Image (spheres, helix red, strand yellow):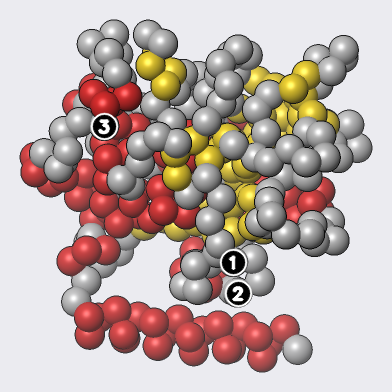
Amino acid sequence: MPNPNGFVYAPTPPKAWTLGSKKATVRFGATFLMPDGHGWKNYVPDYELQNINDVESFACTVYGALKAWITLSNYYGYSLPKNCSERFSGVMANLGPPGGDPHVSGEAVRQWGVIHNNLLPFDETIKSTFEFYQPKPMDEGFIAEAKKSVQKYEFGHEYVFNESPFAPRQNLNRPALLKYALARGPVCVSVHGWKKNADGVYYKETGDSDNHWTQLLDYKEGEYWLIHDQYKPFIKKVAWDTKFQTAQVYFLKENTSGLAPNDITYFQKILKQMSEMVARLALQFKSK
């Protein structure tokens, strides 16, 4: 199996959504879509490789995020493409070897939107990583096509946790946090790819840093996590006690304004931020 690459840790940006900030709750609601965290496997897109023809894309942060949002689109019955172009989103996220930060990749999709894979595919015509990240700058026609998706839908993503590989581990109850996140939406996690024990379960040793980003699909309590990967085998069992460094949960809803994020004026952004701040304060007051 190829050695997965593409996840690069970065500290949580000050404006990023984080679990407990209530920003996602204000924007997308507090609905528990899968109360027990099970069921997303019924909505995931088809399996897809992030390396073809011996060409490694290093684009796992885009592959994971797009799978999560397509899963949500399938769940809601929305019209996002069943297969989005990772090349388009990779260029818009300014990815390349050795990969990137999942927050940056998520923001690229949130701001610019998606196009169908048929328009910019990763197929046998792509002979190098350089070719994967072309055209660069991105074709204006593709940008215009992608804009239609963010005029129609709002994309969101929130950190569940984000730990530096260089700092002492926090005392996190990862299973509780991940199950809570899976109840709210599709989740992606960072992993160390890949070490497998005699039982066929993938694991992470002390000192291993995460280097890959993929969708957390399901779990069996106390036994394993189920991963929907971009390397064969596409479905992997990961040890229950794995200390994932980073996890994000994804959100999607209809865009009632019809405005793309890059079209919102500075004044409109201020008004929106003020409205959401008031809503968050109301939520915090109500919870006391």
Image quarter in which the N terminus is found = top right
| Mark 3 nearby-residue class (10 Å; few <14, some 14–19, many ≥20) | many
The CA distance from mark 3 to mark 1 is 30 Å
The CA distance from mark 1 to mark 2 is 6 Å
Please provide percent x and percent y for residue 221.
87, 37
Please provide percent x and percent y for residue 182.
67, 47
**Which residue in the protein does label 3 denote?**
133
In-image side of 269 versus 169 (left or right): left
Q: Are marks 1 and 2 in contact (CB under 8 Å)?
A: yes
Element under label 1? loop
Please provide percent x and percent y for residue 134.
20, 31
Element under label 3? loop
Residue at 41%, 53% (x, y): give it: 104
Element under label 2? loop
Please provide percent x and percent y for residue 38.
72, 38
For the residue marked with disc 2, what is the amino acid?
Answer: Ser
Q: Are marks 3 and 1 in contact (CB under 8 Å)?
A: no
Residue 246, relative to residue 170: is it above or below? above
Residue 115, relative to residue 237: is it above or below? below
Of labels 3 and 1, the one closer to you: 3
Disc on the earlier residue, 2 or 3: 2
Q: Quadrant of residue 141?
A: top left
For the residue marked with disc 1, what is the amino acid?
Answer: Thr
**Which residue in the protein does label 1 denote?**
18
